[in-house]
Amino acid sequence: MALEVMARAASPIPLDVTFRVEPGELLALVGHSGSGKTTLLRAIAGLWRPERARVAVNGTVWLDTEAGVDLPSHRRRVGIVFQTYALFPHMTAVQNVMAAMERPDRTEAARLLDLVNLHDLADRKPAQLSGGQQQRVAVARALARKPQALLLDEPFSAVDRATREKLYGEIIALRASLAMPVVLVTHDMNEAQLLADRMVVIEKGRVVREGTTAEVMGDPDALRAMGIREVAVMLPAIVVEHLADGLTRLDAATGPLFLPSVEGAPGTRVRVRIMAHEVILSRLRPEGLSAQNILPGQVVRIVPGTGPAMMVHVRIGDDEILSRITRRAAEQMALEPGDAVFAILKSMSVARHHIAPAVRS
C-alpha cells in the first residue's frame, strides 16, 4: 500500500518533487516556510491540483494529469490532520469522529477515541478539551475515514513542549497498529528525527536530499539547505535499569549510556538524540571527569564546516555519532580518519524531549 507522489507546477509555488512512502513508514517533509511542504499535502489530499502530477496508493491512482484522472477529495481514502485541528465546535469528540464516517457508527468512533487514549472524554466538546486532547480527536477523525494514507501537517505546533512529548510517544505507538504510509510536515528537526524513518528535504519546491534520518543529518549540504546548525544523530537503545541516583542505564550499540530518568520499564526500546555540539573528543581516556559517558571509537571522516567549526564522524560499535569541534582543536589533536578517540558525553546534556520510544520494536 505504498504512496507514490510526483508533482510539478510553476505556481503558486514552483514544484518539482517525487517521493515514495512505504506501508508502515513515516516520511518527514522538511524545509523552510514557503518551500512547498503543505502544498504537497494539499495535492495528495485533492485540495489542490498541480499542472503535472501523479498520486497513487497501492496501485490505485488518485491523480494523473496526463491520463485525465483526478478523484475529488471525498473519494480519496486519505486522513489529514491540520495545524488547527479544524474540529466542529458544536459537536462532541465522538460526534466529530462520526462526522468523518461514510456510515456514522458511535461504537467504531468510540473505539478510535480509545485508540488515541480519549475513551473517557467522548462527550466533551472541543472547548472543554486541552490542545493535546483536541489533537487526539483530530487524529481519530482522520482514521475514521479508513484511510490508505495519513497526512500530518505540523500537528504538534499548537501545543506546549510537555504535551508534545507525550503526543510523540502516542503517535509512535499508534504507528505500530497502522500498516499505512504516513507523511509528516514539520520544521522541527527534533520531531523529524524522533518520529521519522526517512526525510525528504525540500528547498524552493525541489528535493535537495532524500534518505534515512541518519543519512540526511550527516549531509552538510542538506543541513545548509535546511538552515540547521545544531546537528544530531539518533541512537537506538534499550532501557536496562533505573538507578537509585536518578539515572537510567541504557544499552546502545555504542556501549552503556547513563542518562537522567528515562521513562519505560527495563527492556523498553528508545531513541536518543545526541547533539553534536555536546560531544567532546579526546585521544586519551580521560580520568577524574564528571562526565559519565566515555565511549571508545574511531574517526571515520572529518567534514569542514563554515567558519571555525568542523564535524567529526566517529564510529562507535555498530553506530556512528557526530562531534562538532573547532578547526583549531582538530589541528591541535592532529585528527585523521582511522584515529582512535574517546567520545565524551555528559549525562545532563541529553534533554528529556530528546528521548522517545523506538519507532519500531
Image (tube, rainbow, N blue to C red):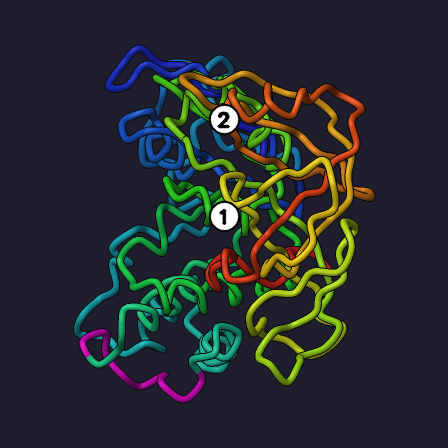
Q: In this view, does 299 lie to the left or right of 184?
A: right
Task: Report which residue position mark 1 lands on.
Answer: 77
Q: Residue furthest front?
A: 288
Q: In which quarter of the image is residue 336?
A: top right
Residue 46 image point, x, y percent: 38, 36
Residues at marks 2 and 1, CA–CA distance in whole angstroms: 51 Å
For this rendering, which residue is in front, 351 or 22? Answer: 351
Residue 249 sits in which quadrant?
bottom right
> Any magenta on residue 344?
no
Crowding near the residue tagged with mark 1, few <14, some 14–19, many ≥20 C-alpha atoms within 10 Å: some
Would residue 18 be visible to someone looking at this image?
no
According to the picture, the residue beneath numbered tag 2 turns out to be: 326
Secondary element at image label 2: strand
On whether residue 121 falls in the magenta region, the answer is yes
Question: Which quadrant is home to the C terminus?
Answer: bottom right
Image coordinates of residue 106 in percent, x first then y, are 43, 80
Mark 2: few/some/many CA within 10 Å (<14, 14-19, 20+): some
Given the image, on which type of amino acid does mark 2 rest?
Answer: Thr
The segment highlighted magenta reads 119-127
Amino acid at dot 1: Arg
Q: Residue at 44%, 14% (x, y): give it.
A: 16
Residue 281 position (above or below residue 262): above
| Residue 114 visible to an observer of this rendering | yes
Name the residue rendered at 42%, 80% in the picture. Answer: 118
Local secondary structure at mark 1: loop
